[in-house]
Image (tube, helix red, strand yellow):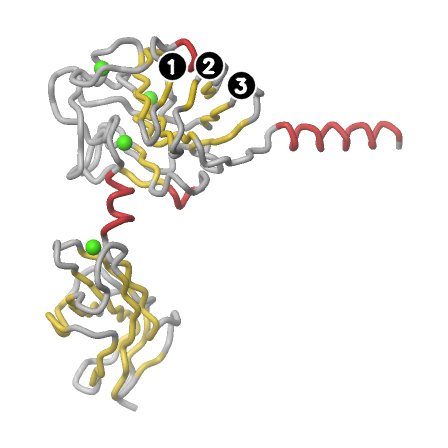
């Protein structure tokens, strides 16, 4: 009995010891865990100071696997307010056209690892890839449509979670690799994912919103659309319909405004694989997309 209690106590201490108090001051903002097209060992990591004060990195550490990086070892170990801090692995050629703030040694396994940022008291104040240690929550290696895309934090003011990371979009990019090729990433610059969060309209389909819903006759399709940096009233709306669960789409109505559409379904074939897409475009041609769950059309009896 006594032994059991001791074990429980140890477990409690372990849990407390690994807890993260997300302070929102300094964050792990971008991770190039797969390296670059010039070399898979050309990994780099970006930190970001969200505050309006400089942060002195003396005593701060970044830890992953059995690697511990002393952030205070940088020549200029201070991050300016709203500034970035670029760590390049092995040498300064990793991101060839931007000077690293710190060169470090040690690999980020492509099998995934948890990154932890510790303040001078040893408290973990931020993490990256938590809850996703079997692989990486975002980013890509050398294959796929967008090779060597970095893992970008979407909202640096929000804590690490699987939904707060996205791959670099390959369009908003910065920096060049050791061969001079543009990176699919944004070293020392705002993340493409953060720019999307701040500019791209968000649309939520309100009806139909239930998986497997049976629809017939005249149906009101409705949605809520907002533009984070513009007027939500004048967004252009295009509706698309899929009869095969979303594999292929046909226009239903294009270039409309508003937040609902009366849809006469009676001329369409019955089926149980229908889906609606609402695409909302702002004046800068940023497109936000909402997709309904699969529903059934049933007009014949
Ligand atoms: Ca790697
Ligand atoms: Ca460099
Ligand atoms: Ca960045
Ligand atoms: Ca916008």
Q: Are marks 3 and 2 in contact (CB under 8 Å)?
A: yes
Cβ–Cβ below 8 Å for labels 1 and 2?
A: yes
**Disc nearer the start of the sequence (3/2):** 2
Q: Secondary structure at mark 3?
A: loop
Q: Earlier in the sequence, mark 3 or mark 1?
A: 1
Residue 177 figure quarter: top left
Residue 172 placement, left or right of 163: left
Q: Position of residue 154 (x, y in %)?
A: 33, 42
The disc placed on residue 77 is 1
**Distance (Cα) linking label 3 and label 1:** 13 Å
Q: CA distance from mark 1 to mark 2?
A: 7 Å
Q: Is residue 75 above or below residue 244?
A: above
Mark 1 residue element: loop
Ligand 2's image quarter is top left
Residue pointed to by mark 2: 58
Residue 213 image-quadrant placement: bottom left
> What residue sits 24% from the left and 62% below the top?
246
Tell me if the residue at label 2 has its CB under 8 Å from ligand 2: no
Considering only vertical position in the picture, is 275 above or below 175? below
Q: Decide: few, some or many residues near mark 1? Use Cα within 10 Å; few <14, some 14-19, many ≥20.
A: some
Relative to 38, say whether 301 is above or below. below
Residue 120: which numbered mark, if any? 3
Give SS at disc 2: loop
Quarter of the image for the N terminus: give it: top right
Quadrant in the picture for the C terminus: bottom left
Q: Which residue lies at the image location 46% right of the left edge and 14% below the top edge? A: 58
Seen from this angle, which residue lies furthest bottom?
A: 301
Q: Position of residue 36 (x, y in %)?
A: 22, 22
């Amino acid at each position: 009995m006594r032994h059991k209690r001791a074990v429980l106590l140890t477990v409690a201490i372990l849990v407390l010891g690994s807890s993260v108090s997300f302070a929102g001051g300094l964050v792990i903002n971008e991770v190039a865990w797969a390296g670059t097209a010039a070399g898979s060992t050309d990994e780099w990591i970006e930190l970001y100071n969200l505050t309006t004060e400089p942060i002195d990195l003396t005593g701060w550490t970044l830890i992953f696997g059995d690697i511990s990086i002393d952030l205070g070892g940088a020549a200029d170990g201070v991050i300016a307010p709203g500034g970035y801090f670029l760590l390049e692995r092995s040498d300064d050629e990793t991101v060839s056209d931007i000077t690293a703030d710190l060169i470090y040694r040690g690999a980020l396994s492509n099998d995934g690892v948890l990154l932890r940022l510790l303040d001078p008291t040893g408290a973990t104040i931020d993490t990256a890839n938590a809850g996703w240690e079997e692989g990486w929550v975002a980013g890509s290696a050398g294959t796929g449509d967008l090779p060597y895309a970095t893992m970008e934090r979407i909202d640096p003011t929000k804590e690490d979670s699987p939904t707060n990371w996205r791959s670099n979009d390959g369009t908003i990019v910065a920096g060049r690799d050791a061969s001079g090729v543009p990176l699919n990433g944004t070293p020392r610059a705002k993340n493409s994912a953060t720019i999307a969060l701040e500019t791209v309209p968000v649309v939520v389909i309100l009806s139909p919103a239930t998986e497997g819903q049976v629809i017939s006759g005249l149906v009101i399709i409705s949605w809520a659309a907002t533009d984070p940096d513009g007027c939500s009233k004048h967004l252009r709306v295009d509706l698309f319909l899929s009869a095969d669960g979303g594999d292929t789409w046909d226009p239903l109505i294009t270039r409309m405004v508003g937040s609902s559409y009366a849809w006469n379904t009676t001329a369409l074939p019955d089926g149980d694989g229908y889906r609606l897409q609402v695409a909302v475009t702002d004046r800068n041609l940023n497109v936000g997309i909402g997709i309904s769950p699969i529903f059934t059309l049933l007009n014949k009896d």
